[in-house]
Amino acid sequence: MLNVLILGLLNGTIYALIGSGLALTYGRQNVIDVANPAFVIVGAYAVTLLSQHMGFDPYVLTPLVVMGLFVLGVLVQAVIINPLLKRPDYEMHVQSALVLFGVALFVQTLLVILFTADFQAVHTSYTDSVLKIGADIRLPWVKIVSAGLSLVTFGCLYALLYHTFFGKAILATYADRQTAQLLCIDVKRVDLMTYGLGTALAGIAGLVIALGFSFSPASVTPWTVIAFAVTVIGGKGSISGTLLAGVVLGLIEAAVSSISANWIYLAAYSLLLLVFLVRPSGFFGERG
């Protein structure tokens, strides 16, 4: 039981990483980024393809994948999202969700065309390595490293948002775009960089998916469930809340794993419903 709970804790930090890009774009841009989980799977395929053809360790290739997805995010922001920012907030929310849902479907279909619908995974010399603690605890090294990478990523993201000028510019733009412009903040550039950062986080999450899970184009849907669950449960605009929500979801998964692996999605929706009923703003979200 202890082994299962520790695995749930490790998986929880990974779930939080999957939702980090969505948490950033939704919390700081008011953009319901339905396409972000699709970019996570794009990152997983990119890591797999590059590691197979270049022969490098997936972790070495991560900066290249992150940079590529950052550029992709900047293009999506410039071409698709920027025209929507001129509309009223309530229209922009709905239309951004619909447009980016179309982007997600396009990406998913393109992945099927390029790579077929078969499941894939990255296999390395350490894929099956485990850390043995005592007689009963067996923890995959891949999950341990992925959890550590998730925590480091969240630490860097928190430091960027709250302890750098760029982070303060993001917060100011989110709080009041007109006032931010009066303070000589280039809000359009901030928008580009923020969405690009969100897709860059999807690249890191893609590495974790490629190493720790099997995936296919159809994986976009279940990971979308996880990403939205941790983002909403954690609270809009809360990076620490997203991390906590991922951990809670991972522990709930561990508790129900003895019934069926598919129960994770029921658990996610149940927790989401409970949070809506008890605390609609999420764990650390802003109260309306």
Image: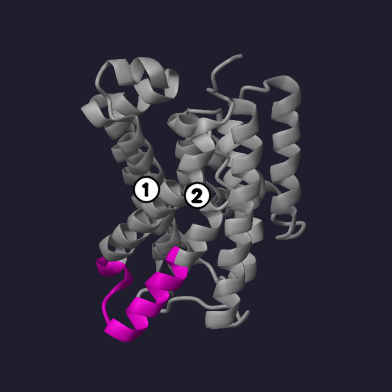
Q: Which residue is mark 2?
A: 80
User: In this view of the protein, can residue 20 be seen by the observer?
Assistant: no
Tag 2: residue type? Ile
Task: Please report the residue visible at 39 percent of the width from the left and 18 percent of the height from the top.
Answer: 178
| Residue 258 image position (x, y, % from top left) | 72, 57
| Residue 34 image position (x, y, % from top left) | 59, 49
Whether residue 59 appears in magenta in the rendering, the answer is yes
The alpha-carbon separation of the residues under discs 1 and 2 comes to 13 Å
Q: Quadrant of residue 183?
A: top left
The boundaries of the magenta stretch are: 43-61
Q: Choose the circle earlier in sequence order: 1 or 2.
A: 2
Whether residue 47 appears in magenta in the rendering, the answer is yes
Task: Please report the residue visible at 53 percent of the width from the left and 46 percent of the height from the top.
Answer: 12
Task: Please report the residue visible at 60 percent of the width from the left and 70 percent of the height from the top.
Answer: 217
Task: Please report the residue visible at 54 percent of the width from the left and 18 percent of the height from the top.
Answer: 286
Q: Residues within 10 Å of mark 1 (few under 14, many from 20)?
A: many
In the picture, measured across the screen, residue 114 lies left or right of residue 91, that is: left
User: In this view of the protein, can residue 8 be seen by the observer?
Assistant: yes
Q: Residues within 10 Å of mark 2 (few under 14, many from 20)?
A: some
| Residue 204 image position (x, y, % from top left) | 38, 56
Q: Which residue is mark 1?
A: 196
In the picture, measured across the screen, residue 69 lies left or right of residue 283, that is: left
Secondary structure at badge 1 equals: helix
Secondary structure at badge 2 equals: helix
Q: Are marks 1 and 2 in contact (CB under 8 Å)?
A: no
Q: Quadrant of residue 90?
A: top right
Tag 1: residue type? Gly
